[in-house]
Amino acid sequence: MTSPNAQGRPTVDWRLVLVLWGDKYAASHVNVLAVNAYTQSPTCGGVILMTDRLREGIDDRVQQVLISDRFNRDEFKKNYTIKLSLFDCGPRENGLPLVYLDLDTVVIGDLGKIASLVNEKNDIYMLPPGGALGFGLIRRLIFRGTHGRRMAVGNSSVLAFRSDMKPNLADEFHRLRESRPTDTKVLMNDDLFISWFGQMRLKPVPNALGVMFRREFLSRARWFGWLKSRLPWVRRRREGVVAVTFNGIEHKLETLLQLPDGSLHHDAKGRFGYWSRQEMGSIKDKIVRRAGLLERANP
């Protein structure tokens, strides 16, 4: 049950979390995500920005929280493990469901649908690895049988979890750094550590809610993309997607927006796809419409 706050917005128990360090992204990237979350997610209770320094130009509705010294280090910025500071966010007791998005993500629907996936204190939802096995039972048996040496590695561009998970992921990362050699593979990357830490309970963010652009719209066989885009159940699923992340330097939204409709987009790994409404359906219109806010914020 919800009740309105002083601004007339529903008071609920989930927050959007963003992380910003260095100078790769601007305040406008944060603001656009915040505005899109507030305007499309009526139950969004707030937006929290974990940042390496207080930033000017951030929307007043965004709460800036300084990343703690234990994460705000150059070594962690280089391998992206600074992003694990997001697990320091929110109360440890009576925890809140949190939804995290990379700053190269576009919100095109209600993020509350992702937040509502989190029912248990130790739930972690993450974009799954490619392939049929995902985070399923077989992957967990392999993980257990190899004593954690082989595992399914997800993508942390979209996450959902509770702030009161036990043990806390951020605490566990530092505990292991102190007890293991610093070159331990799982400690060298945010995706690896989240996947290792949560392997036995990770759940996939369903592709009916969150997708990676390159995985959803590109393929190595051009005919497969053509066929996939024309399957009625794929089109119906895409209608409900609420977040699209453009991870990978070759798939940045700013570059795609410069392409004429119908252009063929490809990358160095031989994946192809058409930047067109005919291939992508109405989801392209939603992306372009929401991305327009970013363009206006960066004249």
Image (cartoon, rainbow, N blue to C red):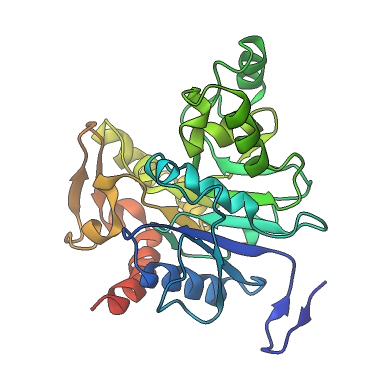
- At horizontal 64% and vertical 59% (from top left) the residue drawn is 113
Q: In which quarter of the image is residue 174?
A: top right
Residue 255 seen in the figure: yes
| 76 in relation to 293, above or below | above
Which quadrant, please, contains the C terminus? Answer: bottom left
Q: Quadrant of residue 271?
A: top left
Side (left or right) of 250 relative to 176: left
Place of residue 244 in the rendered image (x, y in percent of width and height, measured from the top left): 43, 54
Place of residue 257 in the rendered image (x, y in percent of width and height, measured from the top left): 24, 62
- At horizontal 34% and vertical 62% (from top left) the residue drawn is 25
Is 265 or 194 nearer to us in this picture? 194
- At horizontal 76% and vertical 51% (from top left) the residue drawn is 164
- At horizontal 29% and vertical 58% (from top left) the residue drawn is 253
Which quadrant, please, contains the N terminus? Answer: bottom right
Is 184 or 28 nearer to us in this picture? 184
Place of residue 100 in the rendered image (x, y in percent of width and height, measured from the top left): 56, 55
Q: How many labels does the image show?
A: 0
Task: Report the residue that reaches farthest toward the top.
Answer: 145
